[in-house]
Amino acid sequence: MDFKQEYIEEVKQILKNLEKSIMLLDQEPNQPDEINNIYRYLHTVKGSAGMFDFKDMERLTHELENVYTDIRDGIRTIDEYVLDLTLHAIDILNDLIEGSVDSGPTDKIIESIITLRGQEASLESSQSLTANNNKKEAFSIFFRPTETLFKRGINVSAMLEDLEDLTWHEIIIHNESVPFEKQLADQKFVSWLEILAVSEEGREAVDDVFLFLNDQDFQVLKLESKESFTNEEYKKQVVLNDDEVEFRLGKLQSFDAEIFNKQAQQEKTNKSAILQEVKHELQELQEEEEQVETIAIKKSSKKSAHINVSTDKLDDLINIVSELVTFRSEMQHLLSDEKDNEITEAVEKLEFLTLRLRDSAFNIRLVPINILQVKLQRLIRTVSKDLNKEIEFITEGLDTELDRSIITALEAPLMHIIRNSLDHGIESPDERESRNKPRKGLLKLYSYNSGDHVFIQIQDDGNGIDFEKIKKKAIEKGLIKAKQECTEQELINIMMSPGFSTADEVTKVSGRGVGMDVVKKEIESLRGDIDISTEDGLGTIITLRLPLTLTILDTLVVKVSEEKYLIPINEIEYCYEEDHAVLFKNNRRLINYDNVFIPFVSLRNHFGHEEHPEKETVIIVKKNDVRIAVVVDDIIGQYQTVYKPLNELIQDIDCFSGASILGDGTTALILNALKLKN
C-alpha cells in the first residue's frame, strides 16, 4: 500500500469517528471532550490533506475547524444548524476522498460556513481582543529535514505554511549554501531550520504543525527568558554568541516587548493556586493509590494490538479455508475403508486442524453490529425531521458479531425497516399525546445470539400495522377479492409482495412501491428469515434471523432415490424410521409428533418418484417455531458443507437455498424445508 492510499484509509476512519462524535453531540450538546475530539479530527485531516493534493478537502476542513474553534472558545454554541452543516460536510469529505465529486458542492458549503461565521463577526472581534491578552508562550523549534520525509509522503512546504496558524513565528535558516527554495524543489536538503515561535494555545499548537513528523525530526524548547538561549538544552542544538542571542531576543520583542515579563508574571500569579492543587491531588492519590494500581493492572491486561487488513485478503483466506474443508471431506471419503491406524489418526488430525483453522478464519471476519449504529442514527435524525416526529432511539446488544459480508448486505434492509417504522408506525407527537402516549416515539434496535444464528429486532411503540388499510389497498390492486377473509399473517404476506405500498402519495420517505418485498428478498438471500408481530395501538416488532456466516454450514446428508440432498443440522429437531404404509394410510399427510399433528412432505413424491421403499426416514424440521416433517429414503451422515449460491437458472426454485460439493465430487442441493410446506 502506498502512502496516499494509507492516508485515504486513515481519513475514512477519522471521518467515521467524526460522524460518531457529531451524533453524540446531537444527543447531548454540552460535551467539551467531544468538541475537542471534533476539532482534533478536523485539524488532523486538514494538516495532511494538502500534502496529498486534496486541496478542496483542506479548504473545507479549515473552515469547519474555525467553526469549532469558535465553539471551543465559547464564541458560539452548538445548535442544530451547525450539526446539520457538519454532517453535510462529512458527506462531501467522504466524496472528496473517493474522488467522486467536483469543487461545486465544496464551494457551496464553504460559502455557507463563511456566512455562518460572518453572522457573528462583531462578537468574534470583541472576543478576539480579549483573547490577544491571553497568556503567550515562546518556543524555539529545531527542524532538520531529510530526504526520507518526501519518501514518507510529507509535504514540507505545506507543513511550513501551517506555521501561520501560530500566533507569530520567524524562520532562521542554517547552512544555506543552496537557496532553501531550491532545496525544497530538488527534495535535497543541506540546511536546517531554527524557528522562533509564539503560541497562545501552548505547546500543543506547535506539535500540531509537525503532527506527521517523528520525534527525531524536530525538537521544541520552551523559551522563558533571555538565558534560555544559552542553557545546556539549547547548546545541544546550537551554540550562540552574544550577538546571535540579542538578534533572537530582538525578534521576539519586536512582536511583544514584554513577552518574557508576562510569562514570569503569569507563572508567579499561578504558583500559589498550582501548589494548593498539587497538594490536594497528592492527598487524593495517596488515599486512592491501591484502587488506581488495580485499575492500571486491569487496563494493562486488556491492551491488544490491531492491524488493518484488506477485505479482499480476508475473502481469499476464507476461500482457501473453504477449499480445504472440501478437500478434507474428499480425504475422508477416499480413506473411509482404510484399516491402517496411522492413516486413520492422520485423517482425524487433519479434521481437527481444519476445524480450528476454519473457526479462526471466520472469527477474523466477525464484526460487531454497532458499526452500523451511526448510519442508523443519522437516518433516524433526518427522517424524523422530514416527518416532524420526535423519536427516542435505543440500542441493546449491538456488540453481537456477524460476518462482515452479512453486515454490509444488512445495511439497506435495516434502513428500509426503520424508515417504515418512522413513517407508517410511529404517530405524530400530537396524535400520540391524544392517545396518552409520550410525545416522543420509541424505536429500539436489539440483537442477540442464539446457537449459530443472530437475531435482530426492530421494535416501535407506534400504531401497529393497519390491516384494514392493507386489505383495502390489496383489493384496489386486485390481489384479493372484496369479500375475501384474510388472516393477519396472510395480510402481512401481501404487505411483503412486490410493489405493494400503503402510502397515499410519493414522498422522500415512502410511496415508491419499493417496499418490504425487497427487504424480504435481501434477508432470504442471506439465508435468513423475517418475522413480523404487531398489536393495534401498541406497536410492531420485526425480527430478522441470520446465520453467523454464509460460507460453512453443518448439514445432514439424506438420500432420495439416487440423489443426495442436504438439510442444515441446526434446523433438525428429531429423526426416526417409519413404515411407508403407516405414513400413507390416509390422505391427510399429517403425523402425530409430541401430541401435535404436523404436516409432512415426501421428497419422493415432491420430486416425481413413484416408487417408495418399505421403510422411510422422517426428519422433523423446526425453524422460526414452525415444524414440518420431511420424509426421505435414508440418512447418509453428517457433512460440513461449503455453501455455494444457486445460479440464475434455479435460484427461483425456493425449496432450495444453495448447493455444495460432497466429498465424492458430486453436487448436492441444500433444502429449505419450510418452503416445501408452502
Image: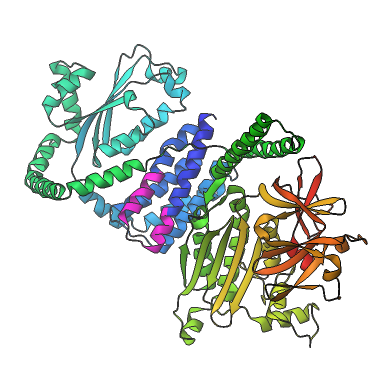
Is 306 positioned to the left or the right of 177 in the image? Answer: right
Q: Which residue is drawn at 72% across and 33% down?
A: 339
In the rendered view, would you say 56 is above or below 187? below
State the quadrant of the N terminus. top right
Instruction: Report the front residue among 111 and 399.
Output: 399
Instruction: Report the front residue among 247 and 16.
Output: 16
Residue 180 among magenta residues: no
Estimate the x, y position of residue 206 in percent, counting from the top left: 29, 35
Residue 30 among magenta residues: yes
Q: Which quadrant would residue 117 be assigned to in this image? A: bottom left
Is 406 positioned to the left or the right of 52 in the image? Answer: right
* Residue 167 visible in the shown view: no
Q: Which residue is drawn at 88% across and 63% down?
A: 605
Instruction: Report the front residue among 399 and 101.
Output: 399
- Residue range of the region highlighted in magenta in the rendering: 21-42
Estimate the x, y position of residue 443 in percent, counting from the top left: 50, 70
Estimate the x, y position of residue 548 in percent, counting from the top left: 59, 52
Q: Residue at x 54, y 50 (%)?
A: 105
Q: Residue at x 49, y 33 (%)?
A: 52
For this orientation, the residue located farthest to the top is 177
Determine the main secondary structure of the stretch shown in magenta: helix
Is 445 positioned to the left or the right of 473 in the image? Answer: left
* Residue 432 visible in the shown view: yes
Instruction: Report the front residue among 325 and 463.
Output: 325
Estimate the x, y position of residue 197 in percent, counting from the top left: 25, 32
